Image (cartoon, rainbow, N blue to C red):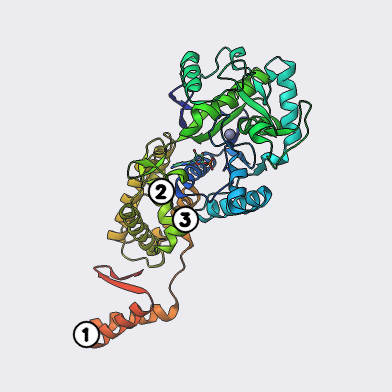
Amino acid sequence: LKLFNTLSKKTEEIKPIKNDSVSLYTCGPTVYHYMHIGNLRKAIFDDLLKRVLSAEGLRVKHVMNITDVGHLASDADEGEDKLEKEARIEKKSVWEIAEYYTEHALADYASVNVLEADKIIKATDCINKEIDFIKKLEEKGYAYKGDLAVYFDSTKLKDYGKLTGQNLADKNVAVREDIVIDKSKKNPIDFALWIFTKAKHKNHAMRWQSPWGEGFPGWHLECSSIIYDQFGDTIDVHTGGVDHIGTHHTNEIAQSEALTGKPLANIWMHTEFLLVDGHKMAKSLGNTYRIVDVEARGFDRLAYRLLVLQSHYRSQQNFTWQALKDAQALLKNLQAAADIRFQPSGSSEHDFKAAQDTILAALTNDLNTPEALASINRVFDQVADEGVSKKDSKVFAGFIIWLDDLLGLELSLSKDITSEQKRLIKQREDARENKDWDSSDKLRDELTGQGIEINDTPAGSIWRRS
Ligand code: AMP
Ligand code: ZN
């Protein structure tokens, strides 16, 4: 299994630290709003990665955080805490906001068949561990107390910023231009580990005592301390969105590597954005859709999952309703072809094993989903055109289950039609044989009324759900 590593900028073979199991950490949602389908795109690719790792015979231990404190309006140290702001707008407590949107985020992930993480950890549930993490950094001379926060001294780390490839001087300038700095901050690139409930944060509702003063943890710290607590020094794979590279992951690496002296993650993976009309789908731009909006327009939630899989995770994807309509039509075709397992006919042979190999070869090549889907379409088109023999229908059914484990498209969940419906199809075939077109048409109408379409093929009548 080869994956593109943002850190080395190369596609690398994954070499798990423990032979047969993979430690995976994915940065989870900030729970101050509903997940939009752009957020889901990232979750779907995290999920695909897990499924491909499992298909390769590896056990996956997946940990995800829930950011319910400390994520400020900018990804760096500026602005209001996103949850505190939303609580003010909605006139609810910040705890209510966190609980409400966490529940919705997890339900939305599940709705597009994203498998739940083995552990989901809220930032607010590990405050003591975060404080211990800062203490250790302080002992090692990487943390210092300023007026408004405890900061990480980024200049103490030789390779700060290595994930971006940006040099320190550039980053310093970039920060200096758009941020009002705490005068006690030693370097503009230093970032907050613990933010005091003072000045602009004096009314911050979530607050805890710490050795440095009352306050709340910075966003980056939660991921570093959860990883340290759950896995130790180094994990196999860490994922996020491309927006995490410059600040959030850069600072996670800084904190963790300062503390352990070891790499935080061997492979760093980043999913590109979902766009709308060329702009990132983002709440702040007011161009977001939720999965419930997709369903309200009559689309299947899994048509969206399929749409996501049609692009590569490292490419931006432009969302249009037309593209979703095409994905919906494709999903219908795949479902119809899958239903052919219930109606074997003829003697056509298919090499499903070879198809599996081709699909897996594409996916293990840095999750090349467009190529995998091209292979899948080829197999399903062939089945739709030629049918499957009785002998092959069981193998085909097994192939579909295998595919569902891999892609989560639920093609194996459809049920056979009823024996009464089968009887109607048989009656219609008999009527046609007797050239009794009247009866044949009536029977077709009756089946159509039950959501069953009939196609007359050389191999006999094939049904599909309308
Ligand atoms: P947030 O809840 O804002 O922290 O975002 C959760 C995840 O969704 C992060 O990993 C972001 O990188 C990702 N994300 C946000 N917007 C988009 C988008 N338009 N397309 C893809 N991923 C996104
Ligand atoms: Zn993170």
Using the image, determine if residue 77 lies above or below residue 361.
above
Alpha carbon distance from label 3 to label 2:
14 Å
Q: Residues within 10 Å of mark 2 (few under 14, many from 20)?
A: some
In this rendering, which labeled residue sits more in front, label 1 or label 3?
3
Q: Amino acid at mark 3?
A: Ile
Question: Which residue is at 41% across, 66% downward?
Answer: 342
Local secondary structure at mark 3: helix
The residue under label 2 is 287
Question: Which residue is at 37% across, 38% downward?
Answer: 316
Image quadrant of residue 189? top right
User: Residue 238, labelled with which disc?
Assistant: none
Please tell me which residue lies in front, 352 or 374. Answer: 374
Q: Amino acid at mark 1?
A: Trp
Alpha carbon distance from label 2 to label 1:
53 Å
The residue under label 3 is 291
Locate residue 361, reporting x and y percent. 40, 38
Q: Quadrant of the C terminus?
A: bottom left
Using the image, determine if residue 63 lies above or below residue 234.
below
Local secondary structure at mark 2: loop
Question: Which residue is at 59% across, 53% downward?
Answer: 90
- Residue 264 appears in view: yes
- Residue 394 appears in view: no
Please tell me which residue lies in front, 27 or 431. Answer: 27
Q: Is residue 434 left or right of residue 187?
A: left
Locate residue 306, reporting x and y percent. 40, 51
Q: Residues within 10 Å of mark 1 (few under 14, many from 20)?
A: few
User: Residue 437, labelled with which disc?
Assistant: 1
Using the image, determine if residue 203 lies above or below residue 211.
below
Local secondary structure at mark 1: helix
Q: Amino acid at mark 2?
A: Asn
**Sequence-earlier tag: 1 or 3:** 3
Question: Which residue is at 37% across, 64% downward?
Answer: 340
